[in-house]
Amino acid sequence: MAKSRRLFLRIAGSTAVIAAAGAVGFAATRTPDKALAPWSVAGSTYTDARMRALSYAVLAPNPHNQQPWLVTLEGDDSFTLSYDLDQMLPHTDPFNRQIVIGLGCFLELMRMAAASDGYRADVDLFPKGQPEPLLDGRPIARVTLAKDASVAASPLFAEVFNRRSNKEPFDTSRPVAPADLAAITSVAGAGAITGTVSDGETIDHLRDISWRAHLVEVETPRTYMESVEVMRFGKAEINAKPDGIDMGGPFLEALNLAGILTRDTLADMSSQAYAQGIDMYREILWSAMGYVYVGAAENTRLDQIAAGRDWVRMNLKAAQLGLAIHPLSQALQEYPEMD
């Protein structure tokens, strides 16, 4: 981010945007409080155990931050989890695999939140069958909460508000201990295929694979534009539609107001904004200091849900260990150019 900020300051006249608004005042008013409200109210305003658990579940990581989940409350203790078919990613996620993984993250955070209140979550996955080859409206799960004194809270639940997907370059002067990587994969469920990478040669190899996969995505117009179209620029846009990719904060919003970082400039693959976006992501990918992975022997909808539940626990474990983590999925995507 420091590099992009220096480039920004070299653009003639651009700093006038902040100066005109008043640098301190502008920065102080750029927080999208409405969009961030779910993080501050999770668990605090609900007496219904389902609503309390769901208030944490909506904080789950999911692809492109699409937040596709739809919930129908039923009776006094149950609900059905479904999804909004308008929130799919048909170009980068043509079989909805990543969306289903995100729904697995949702279910796992819900389960952990319920357990923290002494409730057992009985989850009946795909009660009307597994939707294949695409999600077709059939629900993901029907869930019933039951008070159960034997249910224990997970220590990972304390990290819900600390979990992040890192968007900055990693510190290449600080190796990640193999024991920490192993601790992250240790929280995956039975049957998961997990592994770690900490040796320099293999790290370089995976950096290269990750980087080349990212280039495929951003150099393929339809897959790149799928990201651009869900970007939210500045406080007002983020508050109005708090899903998608956040392009907020004083610095990025100033670029937007100056006409330097906009949906149109990013859509122009010959623009400086497009080139700087690639440079910023290059710094992140080529600074990776270790890898963990989780997979399954098959690729059924049940496996995808399990992978999401594993992923969110691994993410929480990384936060518990004080490690920054960034998800990489581009190389796994199923569109032809990525082959």
Image: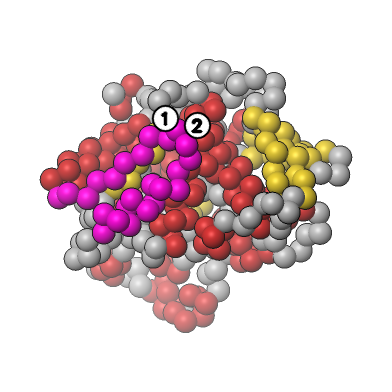
Identify the amino acid type marked 2: Gln
Q: Are marks 1 and 2 in contact (CB under 8 Å)?
A: yes
Q: Is residue 300 magenta?
A: no
On screen, residue 113 versus residue 245, left or right, reads right
Residue 152, percent across and down? 63, 55
Residue 36, percent across and down? 60, 62
| Residue located beneath label 2 in the image | 304
Task: In the displayed orientation, state which residue is furthest to the right.
Answer: 75
Q: Which residues are magenta?
A: 176-200
Quadrant of image for the C terminus = top left
Q: Is residue 183 magenta?
A: yes
Q: Residues within 10 Å of mark 2 (few under 14, many from 20)?
A: many
Quadrant of image for the N terminus = bottom left
Image mark for residue 249? none
User: How far apart, in angstroms, are the residues tagged by discs 1 and 2?
Assistant: 8 Å
| Residue located beneath label 1 in the image | 296
